[in-house]
Image (spheres, grey):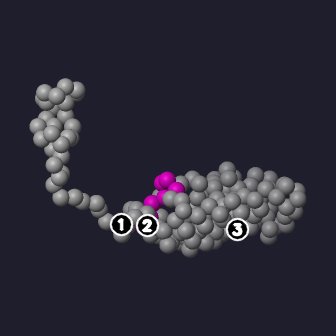
Amino acid sequence: MSSYANATTDFLIYGLPAVAIASIPTGSIQATLDAISSECDGSIAGQYALPLISYPAELTKYVCWMGALELMSVRGYNPEGDGGLLISRDKRAREWLSNVARGLISPPGMVGADGQNEDLAGAGDITSDPLRGWQHTPPNNTRGGSGGGFGPWGD
């Protein structure tokens, strides 16, 4: 099981201030982040081989944002008290996750267990027969310029 956020470090940076979660045991916070990480895995499994080898801080941030709403909803939360910030962050995080799941975005640094994005895994390599009339120009060419390069002139 993946865990994309840590309760004692990441959550204090991206989630909620220590004052807001002082009454919530660290184990409960971590269990919530683990459950949301698992939910994220379910969404991205169609695009990336799991477990992820690496992932961007963006994923950690969004797991914390979703976790913040989850924890505050259990503890008791008045969305009018923060102008709906936790709800809007949760919505933004879920939209991002949905876009990753649909292949609309490929976050830099997100690498599946196979070392690549699953979308590209079956694409294959592009190859070609010989250069079809294009030949390498030797560095000591007589045509001027800095020399070296490719061209149809067959030096």
User: Toward the viewer: 123 or 2?
Assistant: 123
Instruction: Tell me residue 19's x, y (percent).
Output: 80, 53
Q: Is residue 133 magenta?
A: no
Range of magenta residues: 107-114
For the residues marked 2 and 3, what is the alpha-carbon distance in whole angstroms?
35 Å
User: Toward the viewer: 119 or 2?
Assistant: 119
Tell me the quarter of the picture where residue 41 sits: bottom right
**Residue receiving disc 2:** 119
Q: Quick check: 33 left or right of 152?
A: right
Instruction: Tell me residue 109's x, y (percent).
Output: 48, 54
Q: Quick check: 61 left or right of 88?
A: left
Q: Is residue 108 magenta?
A: yes
Secondary structure under tag 2 reads helix
Instruction: Tell me residue 17's x, y (percent).
Output: 76, 52
For the residues marked 1 and 2, what is the alpha-carbon distance in whole angstroms?
8 Å
Residue at horizontal 56 percent and vertical 74 percent from the top: 42
Secondary structure under tag 1 reads loop
Badge 3 density bin: few <14, some 14–19, many ≥20, Cα 10 Å: few
Q: Quick check: 110 left or right of 115?
A: right
Chief SS of the magenta region: loop
C-beta proximity under 8 Å, tags 3 and 1: no
| Amino acid tagged 3 | Ser
Q: Quick check: 66 left or right of 23?
A: left
- Foreground: disc 3 or disc 1: 1
| Amino acid tagged 2 | Asp
Residue at horizontal 20 percent and vertical 40 percent from the top: 151
**Residue receiving disc 1:** 123
Residue 28's disc number: 3
| Amino acid tagged 1 | Ala
Quadrant location of the C terminus in the rendered image: top left
C-beta proximity under 8 Å, tags 1 and 2: yes
User: Toward the viewer: 21 or 60?
Assistant: 60
